[in-house]
Amino acid sequence: MASGATESFKYFRQEIEHQETQTWEALKSSGTALIPFLSQDCVMIFPGSTIFSAHSKPSLNEILYTPMKPWIKYDMKDVHVVQLGQDAAQISYSVEAHRKDSAYTAMISSVWRREAGVWKMVLHQQTLPTLESDTG
């Protein structure tokens, strides 16, 4: 990869990591604070839940308007960004996040699309890690 291409990807990666970080920051206040980061056709998949979208029952917006305990802190590790084109990217990482009375560990994958110059999340999936003894 040429030096210019390397620098270009470095900037692209930073943009996507920044967007993902901003979603966690938004969730330190409320679910509704996440809405400006989401595309109209966003889909979210959570462990033990259904698939939430604009067309699910309840809808993704209804879920985000439900009162939630805000996250207090989070730590994203082992971050990987894949550029899917000029205006699309996938990010995956593990996270340890904390609420006032609980901790949460998951593997995360999100897909971002640039819409009219603004990055919007189009897919977000959380997977609970498997215990090492479960893998065989």
Image (cartoon, grey):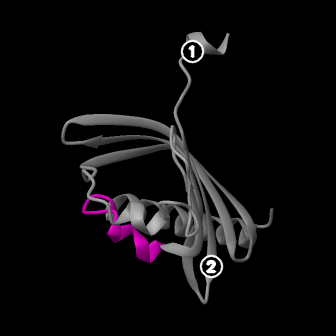
Residue plotted at (79% across, 67% down): 2
Residue plotted at (72% across, 73% down): 4
Q: Crowdedness of circle 1 by 10 Å Cα count: few (<14), some, many (20+)?
A: few
Question: Can I make out residue 78 in this image?
Answer: no
Question: Can I make out residue 33 in this image?
Answer: yes
Q: Residue furthest right?
A: 1
Q: Secondary structure at mark 1?
A: helix
120 lies above or below 52: below
Look at mark 2 in the image and give the residue it sits on.
Answer: 114
Q: Crowdedness of circle 2 by 10 Å Cα count: few (<14), some, many (20+)?
A: some
Residue plotted at (57% across, 10% down): 133
Residue plotted at (51% across, 37% down): 48
Q: Secondary structure at mark 2?
A: strand
Residue 92: x, y in percent?
59, 49
Q: Does label 2 or label 1 sit earlier along the sequence?
A: 2
Residue 8: x, y in percent?
67, 72
Q: Quadrant of the N terminus?
A: bottom right
Q: Residue furthest front?
A: 57
Residue 136 shown left or right of residue 45 in the figure: right
Near-viewer residue (38 or 68): 68
Q: Quadrant of residue 82?
A: bottom right
The magenta span reads 27-37
Residue 96: x, y in percent?
39, 38
Look at mark 1 in the image and give the residue it sits on.
Answer: 132
Amino acid type at mark 1: Glu
Is residue 34 within the magenta segment?
Answer: yes
Residue 89: x, y in percent?
67, 65
Q: Quadrant of the C terminus?
A: top right
Residue 64: mark:
none
Amino acid type at mark 2: Arg
Do the numbered discs 2 and 1 sit on residues whose CB atoms are within 8 Å?
no
Q: CA distance from mark 2 to mark 1?
A: 37 Å
